Image (cartoon, rainbow, N blue to C red):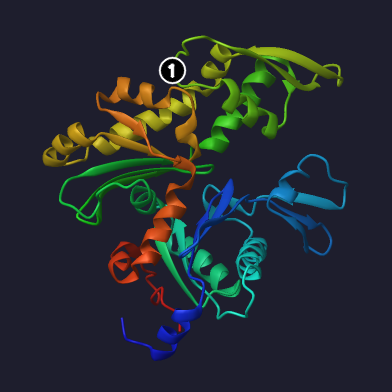
Amino acid sequence: MAFNPLNWLLGLFSLDIGIDLGTANTLVHVRGKGIVINEPSWVAIDKRSRQPLAIGLQAKEMVGRTSGNIVVLRPLRDGVISEFEITEAMLEYFIGKVHEQSVVPLPRPRVVIGIPSGVTEVEKRAVYDASMSAGARETYLIEEPTAAALGAGLPIGETRGSMIVDIGGGTTEVAVLSMAGVVVSRSLRVAGDELDQSIVQYVRNKYNVLVGERIAELIKWNIGSAFPLPVEKTVEMRGRNLVTGLPESIEISSVEVREALSQSVQVIVETIKDALDEVPPEIVADLMDTGICLAGGGALLHGLAERLSDELNLRVWVAEDPLTCVVRGTGIVLDDFSAGSRYLVGLERGSTRHS
């Protein structure tokens, strides 16, 4: 990478930021300050002008409550950009929010963004372009499982093998890493959103009641599980009866929610087994010592670590603060960029460096 005196000078004064551009939440880490933004990846737009009206938490609170001329959406689906201009506006908003905290004008920031490991070159380019259009001076990309492993404190620069399973909103990323590289990886578009949809579908089929995704998500966190609970629970769920069209409350148990989630959880289990099947025996021996680390919001599903331990015959543990692992990983890269740059991925058409 050629030395650029101007970039070096700007780097002394700019706010370097790491972004976990997630399907469900966007987190922003500022070098030297830590995580400064953690907001839902929702945008409310005017249907006619396509102009953003609200972004983040304010937009999420509008879901299901808007008038006909406002639509609330998530511009990322399955971990990739589905609405380019809206993603750009969201990034611009978050980058601007970081700069608002400074009392003096600052140069445009250097940005490191996490991307799913299974994305295409076109999808990578879309993230890069959206970041540059949103005001970045330079944009670098890092695969989310690598960032999550760094954020979880796994020794991925060593010869000893490590394994991370990062379950986000749109994707589940499975990766075995050694010597700063990915040995085996899988990117699966079954994750938190799919689990919410499984609950919606289950309640619809069994009770003829339609519930919203936000309610399904609350049920998942309150009583959802991947393994039998020490004490099973029940909770009231409200929705619309599809036969009468009237509001209805039903009582649903943690046993039923586990049944609703079982198929999606099993797909994740099989994907991990599939990845393990390709791992060299030496690294399998390492994993018997180090175990498998769970990161991402999905790692918080009750009993998931126990279920995976039971099925995989390996120790499975949840990272400290699993929701922030990816963005903390981007922060580690920014803290020592000369050492961290080996974890970045390039674009086939041109480099990730922009001068």
Q: Residue at x 81, y 17 (%)?
A: 248
Q: x%, y% of residue 251? A: 69, 12
Q: Residue at x 82, y 65 (%)?
A: 49
Q: Nearer the viewer, residue 293 or 81?
A: 293
Count numbered badges in the picture: 1
**Left or right: residue 232 compared with residue 147:** right
Q: Residue furthest top?
A: 231
- Secondary element under disc 1, as helix, strand or loop, is loop
Image quarter where the C terminus lies is bottom left
Name the amino acid type tagged 1. Phe
Q: Residues within 10 Å of mark 1 (few under 14, many from 20)?
A: some
Image quarter where the N terminus lies is bottom left
Q: x%, y% of residue 211? A: 72, 26
Q: Is residue 3 above or below residue 307?
A: below
Residue on which disc 1 sits:
227
Q: x%, y% of residue 113? A: 47, 62
Q: Nearer the viewer, residue 202 or 323?
A: 323
Q: Is residue 89 above or below residue 161?
A: below
**Left or right: residue 316 compared with residue 12:** left
Q: x%, y% of residue 257? A: 57, 18
